[in-house]
Image (spheres, rainbow, N blue to C red):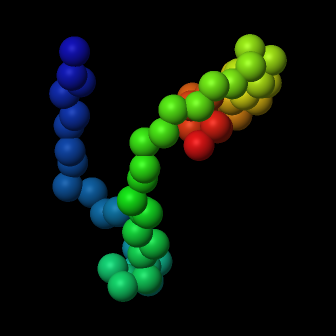
Amino acid sequence: MKRNRKYRDEPLGRLEVVKDFLPSPDELVLRDDGVKITISLSKRSVDFFKRHAARSKVPYQKMIR
């Protein structure tokens, strides 16, 4: 359920212009093209990645990559 917001015509206080901090499109690093492969890992290796991924709160597949 959405809350209804009531906006009032009040002063916002001291405002400050922030310099653009995002990099230009030329400075962005593009992803390399991926190549699909199949690998076999031991259960011990997969458990290792799962444990460390859980600590970092990321999927274990990304940890392997």
What x and y, as percent, mark residue 3?
23, 24
What x and y, as percent, mark residue 26?
36, 85
Q: Residue at x 40, y 69 (%)?
A: 30
Query: How many numbered dots are placed on residues in this image?
Result: 0
Q: Quadrant of residue 9?
A: bottom left
- Report whether 51 appears left or right of 11: right
Q: Which residue is drawn at 42% across and 53% down?
A: 34
Quarter of the image that includes the N terminus:
top left
Q: Which of 39 and 65 is in front in this view?
A: 39
Q: Quadrant of residue 7?
A: top left
Q: Which residue is drawn at 45% across and 72% down?
A: 29
- Report whether 15 appears left or right of 56: left
Q: Which of 4 and 30 is in front in this view?
A: 30
Q: Quadrant of residue 57?
A: top right
What x and y, as percent, mark residue 28?
42, 75
Q: Is residue 15 visible?
A: yes
Q: Can residue 16 be seen in this view?
A: no
What x and y, as percent, mark residue 25?
33, 79
In this view, 17 is above or below 64: below
Q: Which residue is drawn at 31% across and 63% down?
A: 11
In this view, 32 is above or below 23: above
In this view, 35 is above or below 17: above
- Report whether 15 appears left or right of 7: right
Quarter of the image that includes the C terminus:
top right
